[in-house]
Image (tube, helix red, strand yellow):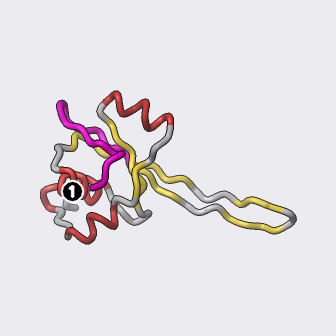
């Protein structure tokens, strides 16, 4: 069985913009930015290699690690109606020393 590496993974410019949906701007995301980390919302089908290629291609920075987490959609009730929250996926990107991304400015 062959292992994939980030060098084997090529993505188009259009897919790079689809992979990085939006930055997560929360208190926790701001705190981890002190440790050279940035958080983005990504599609459920995006993998770590795709996310790394998109960050390096769009922001021209060196990525050290990519950690992903999925938030399962919960069943909620409101006024007797049953609904479901959407499933989301976040990626926490650790940048190499000396690299930074300003998420408040546009791409």
Vertical arrangement, residue 2 with respect to residue 65, above or below? below
Task: From this view, report whether residue 34 is shown above or below residue 88.
Answer: above
> Of 20 and 45, which appears nearest the observer?
20
In percent of width and height, residue 54 lies at 24, 58
Instruction: Please tell me in which quadrant of the rendered image residue 57 appears.
Output: bottom left
Question: Which residue is the extreme one toward the front?
Answer: 105
Main SS of residues in magenta: loop
Residue 62 rendering spot, x and y as whole percentages: 17, 43
Q: Which of 29 and 88 is in front in this view?
A: 29
Left or right, 43 with respect to 74, comes to left
Residue 85 falls in which quadrant of the image?
bottom right
91 shown above or below 26: below
Q: Is residue 4 left or right of residue 74?
A: left
> Which residue is rendered at x = 27% and y = 56% of the image?
107
Magenta region: which residues? 91-107
Q: 79 above or below 33? A: below
- Residue at x-position 43% and y-position 34%: 30
At a point 25% along the width and 71% down the height, the residue shown is: 14
91 to the left or right of 99: right
Residue 55 point in image, percent of width and height: 24, 53
Where residue 1 appears, as percent x and y from the top left, is: 22, 61
Q: Does the magenta stretch include residue 41?
A: no
Residue 3 in view of the camera: no
Point out the residue furthest to the left here.
7
Label 1 SS: helix
* Residue 96 belongs to the span the image colors magenta: yes
User: In percent of the image, x 29 and y 33: which residue is there?
Assistant: 36
Judging by the rendered image, the residue that carries numbered circle 1 is 58
Question: Of residues 23 and 10, which is closer to you in this image?
Answer: 23
């Amino acid at each position: 069985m062959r292992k994939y590496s980030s060098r084997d993974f090529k993505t188009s410019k259009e897919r790079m913009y689809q992979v990085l949906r939006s930055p997560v701007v929360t208190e926790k995301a701001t705190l981890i930015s002190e440790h050279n980390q940035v958080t983005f919302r990504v599609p459920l089908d995006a993998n770590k290699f795709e996310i790394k290629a998109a960050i390096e291609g769009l922001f021209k920075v060196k990525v050290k690690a990519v950690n992903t987490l999925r938030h399962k959609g919960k069943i909620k009730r409101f006024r007797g109606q049953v609904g479901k929250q959407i499933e989301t996926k976040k990626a926490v990107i650790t940048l190499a020393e000396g690299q930074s991304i300003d998420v408040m400015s546009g791409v």
